[in-house]
Amino acid sequence: MFKSIKGARLGLFVFLGTVLLVVSIFVLGNKDQLFTDTISVKTYFTTIEGLKNGAPVWLSGYNIGSVKSISLANGETGKVEVSMKIKAELHHFIRLNSIASIETEGLVGKKIVSITPGTSDKAIVSDGGFIASRTPIKISEILEDSRDVIKHLNTLSAQFADISVKINNGTGTVGKLINDDSLYSNTVEILKSADK
């Protein structure tokens, strides 16, 4: 009889230890906001640029939730519906005129959803409500524009190099002014005669 009581105590101890370990992992990780009341807020994007489920949701730089799901919207618009879990105690900052945008955390970090706080004259978004979105900046478009800028800079630097060579060779008015020793001598003579 004592062996069964010791076995039961050992089993209960192992069970409670395992439960405590799992709970502490969720509390420390806080990825799914296991013990936090949340509401759902949705928005539509034309493109999500690599946003993933579980990505952080920020309001003015403060983490207020995470992306719950990403799916194609019903209909033929081709838009992407992003559903976010927002901490219930902070959702009063999200108003009908709040705007969601997809940004990059750091220079080359992961994608996040950033929400601007709305103004107090607009209603608070309800659970399951929608807010407007801003189209994310496409890195490919920025790279394309930077290629054009670099191409123009290369052309300008080649033209400047040609001008520098002509000036050093004494070609043109500026080249003659800089490289002609007789002009320097005449200028010195004029200054000397002006001093007298």
Image (cartoon, rainbow, N blue to C red):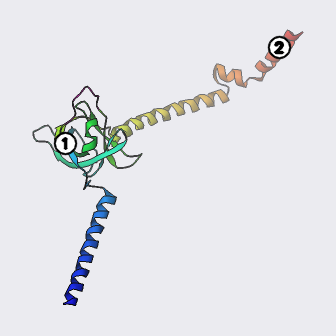
182 lies left or right of 108: right
Residue 17 x/y as whole percent? 29, 72
- Comparing 196 with 63, the one in front is 63
User: Residue 121 magenta-drawn?
Assistant: yes
Query: Residue type at mark 1?
Result: Val
Q: Tell me the residue that label 2 is attached to.
A: 191
- Comparing 149 with 96, the one in front is 96
Residue 15 x/y as whole percent? 24, 74
User: Residue 54 magenta-drawn?
Assistant: no
Residue 69 x/y as whole percent? 20, 49
- Comparing 19 with 142, the one in front is 19
In this view, 16 is above or below 137: below
Secondary structure beneath disc 2? helix
Residue 70 x/y as whole percent? 20, 48
In this view, 97 is above or below 193: below
Q: Which residue lies at the image location 71% right of the left edge and 24% below the top edge? A: 178
Q: Which residue lies at the image location 37% right of the left edge and 41% below the top edge? A: 61
Q: Give the main secondary structure, helix, strand or loop, of the magenta stretch.
A: loop
Secondary structure beneath disc 1? strand
Within-10-Å neighbours for mark 1: few <14, some 14–19, many 20+: some
Dot placed on the residue nearer the N-terminal end, 2 or 1? 1
The circle on residue 80 is 1
Query: Residue type at mark 2?
Result: Leu
Q: Disc count in the image? A: 2
State how far apart marks 2 and 1 are (Cα).
77 Å
Q: Which residue lies at the image location 72% right of the left edge and 25% below the top edge? A: 179
Span highlighted in magenta in the image? 118-125
Residue reaching furthest to the right: 196
Residue reaching furthest to the left: 75
50 lies left or right of 173: left
Q: Which residue lies at the image location 41% right of the left edge and 46% below the top edge? A: 106
